[in-house]
Amino acid sequence: MEGSTVARCSVHCLGALIMPKRTHLSVTEKSCQCNYLQRAADNPENPIRFDQRTSEYQFVFGDGRLRIFHCPFCGGAAPESKRSLLFAQIPYSEEDRLSQVLEPIKTIDDALELLGKPDVDSYLAVRTPEAENKAPTIERLRDIRYYGLSDVADVSIAERPDGLISWHLQGKYVGDQSPDR
């Protein structure tokens, strides 16, 4: 990596540049003014709940949850999520270190040889929805994960359909670190 320049922009930064609203389909950032979400969450008969750890309203159904970005009554934006506070931030120096470790890895077999037995060896399903003149698809890809390569990041390596790999880093779960809790 010496001599090369890595352009960096966090997801939050990219979101500010590309997606200034709650979701790419949001039409407003004006906050909910009618308090419907809070009243609904206070009613145990209603499927809407408030998750204090993330500051998110969610529809709860069975074992599932669906985050609510906008009030279904007035259309105003729900509170901004604090979910990112639950995960470690990966410093650029650690990103660079892990990038150097992962650079020579081109296949899953390379990863197993260089890094040893993964903590998780499984398959994930990548679902592509129906698009114009294309049927929906489901791809199964091998996914291996290493939790002990870094103090702040988990490493996931996925095998692409062409047999090569792609990898990503995810901040380790640290729990609720917000200052007001």
Image: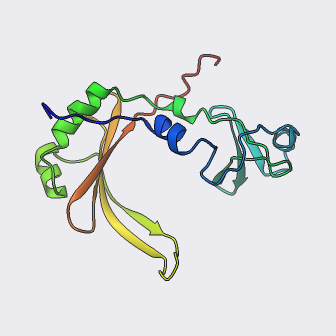
Considering only vertical position in the picture, is 30 above or below 91?
below
> Which percent across, then down, holds residue 75?
80, 49
- Whether residue 96 sits left or right of residue 173 in the image: it is left
- In the image, what residue occupies the spot 51% across and 39% down? 17
Quadrant position of the C terminus in the picture: top right
What colouring does the structure picture have? rainbow
Camera-side residue of 121 and 52: 52
> Which percent across, then down, holds residue 171?
40, 34
> Which percent across, then down, holds residue 149?
25, 35
All told, the count of numbered labels is: 0
- In the image, what residue occupies the spot 17% across and 35% down? 4
- Whether residue 120 sits left or right of residue 28 in the image: it is left
> Which percent across, then down, holds residue 163?
20, 65
Q: Quadrant of residue 139?
A: bottom left
Considering only vertical position in the picture, is 166 above or below 82?
below
Q: In which quarter of the image is residue 97?
A: top left
Considering only vertical position in the picture, is 162 above or below 26?
below
Quadrant position of the N terminus in the picture: top left
Camera-side residue of 117 and 23: 23
- In the image, what residue occupies the spot 75% across and 43% down? 49
- In the image, what residue occupies the spot 36% across and 68% down? 140
- Whether residue 45 sits left or right of residue 64 in the image: it is right
Camera-side residue of 176 and 77: 77
Q: Quadrant of residue 36?
A: top right
